[in-house]
């Protein structure tokens, strides 16, 4: 759980009840989400290589943009959806 989440909530509100309950629910939700993801990863064995390819594509896209070549947003979405769908 992120250590900086409590100061971030204090940046939005000063009500201690909201700060406490929002962080409590965030922690509880993260625990259940972790259990769900752990179970899903056992069935999706190609997801990790697919995520690695997505990160590589994003890095290549950033380098291409730095070099003056712009990859259209729709193309990026199609590549990411295709990689994750295939994984």
Image: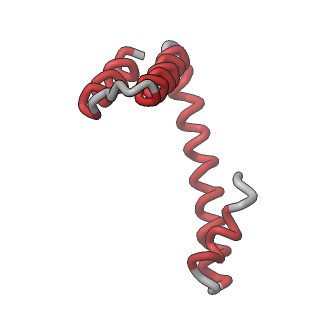
Query: Looking at this view, is 11 or 68 the one in front?
Result: 68
Choose top left, top right, bottom left or bottom right for residue 83: top left
* Image-based side of 69 in relation to 19, left or right: left
Q: Is residue 25 above or below residue 78?
A: below
For this rendering, which residue is in front, 1 or 29?
Answer: 1
* Image coordinates for residue 1, horizontal then vertical, percent: 70, 52
The answer to whether 44 is drawn above or below residue 25 in the figure is above
Please tell me which residue is depicted at 55% across the width and 44% down the height of the picture: 33
Depth check, front residue: 65 or 33: 65
Q: Is residue 33 left or right of residue 77?
A: right
20 to 61, vertically: above or below: below
Residue 75 point in image, percent of width and height: 27, 26
In-image side of 57 versus 18 (left or right): left
User: Compared to 59, does 31 lie above or below?
Assistant: below
Side (left or right) of 72 relative to 83: left
Q: Residue at x 24, y 31 (%)?
A: 74
Q: Is residue 44 visible?
A: no
- Please, which residue is most extreme toward the right here? 3
Q: Position of residue 23 (x, y in %)?
A: 64, 66
Viewport quadrant of the C terminus: top left
């Amino acid at each position: 759980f992120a250590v900086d989440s409590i100061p971030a909530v204090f940046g939005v509100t000063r009500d201690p009840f909201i700060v406490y309950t929002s962080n409590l629910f965030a922690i509880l939700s993260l625990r259940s989400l972790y259990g769900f993801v752990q179970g899903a990863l056992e069935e999706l064995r190609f997801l990790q290589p697919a995520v690695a390819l997505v990160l590589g594509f994003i890095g290549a896209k950033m380098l291409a943009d730095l070099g003056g070549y712009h990859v259209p947003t729709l193309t990026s979405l199609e590549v990411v959806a295709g990689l994750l769908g295939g994984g």
